[in-house]
Amino acid sequence: MDKREALKALEEEMRQDKALPLHPANLVFGEGDPDAAVLFIGEAPGQREDELGRPFVGRAGQLLDKLIVSIGWQREEVYITNIVKRRPPLNRDPLPEEIEAYRPYLARQIEILHPVLIAPLGRFSMNYFLPEAKITRDQGKLFRAGDRLIFPLLHPAAALRGTGAMQSLVEAFGRLPKAVEKCRSLDLASVPDATPAPETGQKSLL
Ligand code: URA
């Protein structure tokens, strides 16, 4: 089975899984190039995403698109998804049990996509990989979490709420191409695993 078929099968399996929380809201599985070097992972779909069945198509998504273009890439060349793949009512934060329920599916999606680098958008997604990381301290740094390389970024919706946050996201985003190049040349086994990051913060690999 090739990647596209594997993703289709996974999506269909999720659709049929009536035990998943937030079922039967629209499933927003994710989209993009299955061979993308970079996988962006947000929190959960909002209203617009729920309506269109696509991730990051509202205001936060427009900012994400602009940021992608600002570094000379296009949205079609990356892959975009969320941890929780259905909209929580009234756009509330995803609950820990919802994140847990969707976790195995996200793990399989990542396994299929096998990106060079994962860029979590926001603290929920970052903490999925790096439970001890802090978004303001650790955004724009590069970490190893198990066999994945993680480059945390502020959630675009948070950046839309403040100029300081916007500036720091723009700066961190600008380092993304360099982070990808670094990841391509890194020998994973030779770098420390940041999953149980010490309180003082883990050193960036970048
Ligand atoms: N915010 C998210 O975290 N994901 C989306 O898809 C849209 C907004």
Image (tube, grey):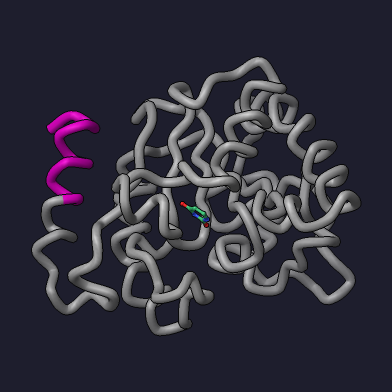
Residue furthest toward the left? 16
Residue 89 x %, y %: 39, 76
Q: Nearer the viewer, residue 146 or 157?
A: 157
The N terminus: image quadrant: top left
At 71% from the left edge and 22% from the top edge, which residue is drawn? Answer: 70
Task: State the image quarter where residue 19 is shown.
Answer: bottom left
Q: Is residue 32 above or below residue 153?
A: above
- Front in this rendered view, residue 143 or 81: 81
| SS majority, magenta | helix
Please tell me whether residue 126 belongs to the stretch shown in magenta.
no
Q: At which x and y percent is residue 58?
A: 50, 46
In the visual, does 192 lie left or right of 148? right
Residue drawn where x is 32% and y is 76% of the image: 101
Asked whether residue 8 is drawn in magenta, I would say yes
Residue displayed at 45% across by 41% down = 80
Q: Nearer the viewer, residue 90 or 159?
A: 90
Image location of residue 93, percent across then percent down: 53, 75
Relative placement, left or right, of 56 versus 160 is left
Please state the horizontal and vertical placement of residue 91, each as a whole percent of the image: 48, 70
Residue 111 vs 25, above or below: the answer is above
- The stretch in magenta equals 1-11
Q: Is residue 106 above or below residue 197?
A: above
Residue at the image point whose x is 61% and y is 52% from the top? 121
Work out which residue is located at the far top of the displayed protein and give it: 72
